[in-house]
Image: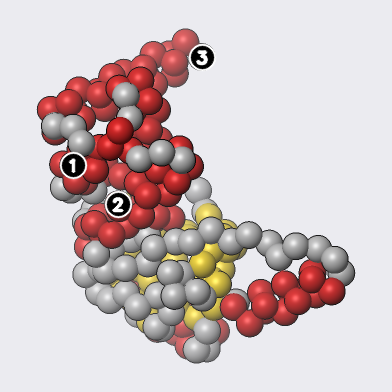
Amino acid sequence: MTADAILDALKDVVPGLAATFGRSCEVVLHDYRRPEHSVVAVAGDLTGRHVGGAMSEIGLSVLARGDDAENELNHVTRTPSGRTVKSSTLPLRDEHGHVFGALCVNLDVTALRQVGDLLADLAGGEPAAVPTTTFTDDVDEVVDAVVRAEELALAKPVDGLSRRERLPLLRTLDRRGVFRVRGAAPRVAARLGISRASLYADLAQCRGADDTRTEER
């Protein structure tokens, strides 16, 4: 089946899946050929997204892997509003085997997680840490969230990085799919305090180095 035919067929499936799991469930259908507005169908109101909205960091990572993408099952994360969500992302392939989108199922497991944390506390353990994922209709917010996460990991402002420090950051952002989004490059360049030309040159060097390492293997 063509990509469009698969999406059309699944649009009718999305409401039924969400209804099966009840109010704690949200099902989102993505078309990665339009990464800035990838949501083509949504049922449920867990992450507040709408048709024409953006993918999350999870979707970006699937997009970055391209045709090598695999199912991302039972990924536990937290929304900015504090809900704990268990997500599964299933890549969709066209008749040629190319990944072009994804069907995502999100379950609100906040109450269950609270019970688990309580039991862990009673047993003398620590509550499990849960990363935060940005779910929004604005892809710029998703890009900013990825950059912020890497900035926190570096423990220093990204606009003060030397070129030597900047290259690994750009390589990481590239692998996380940031530069698959239209308009992300100038936005990241502004955050780093460098020109777009410098960013493109650095990014080309990162990709060239990665290609060389792949050939050496």
Using the image as rendered, state which of residue 157 and residue 16 is in the foreground.
157
Residue at label 1? 190
Q: Mark 1 or 3 closer to N-term?
A: 1
Residue marked by disc 2: 143
Looking at the image, residue 132 sits to the left or right of residue 175; the answer is right
Would you say residue 199 is visible in this rendering?
Answer: yes
Residue at 32%, 24% in the rendered image: 162
- Residue 97 to residue 210: above or below: below
Q: Residues within 10 Å of mark 2 (few under 14, many from 20)?
A: many
Query: SS of the residue at dot 2?
Result: helix
Q: Residue 92's image quarter?
A: bottom left
Residue 70 is situated, as x and y percent measured from the top left of the image, at 50, 48
Q: Mark 3 or mark 2, which is nearer to you?
A: 2
Tell which of 149 and 174 is nearer to you: 149
User: What residue is drawn where x is 51% and y is 67%?
Assistant: 78
Q: What mark, if any, has residue 124 been given in the picture? A: none
Count of marks overlaid on the render: 3
Looking at the image, is 20 positioned above or below residue 166? below
The residue where tag 3 is placed is 217
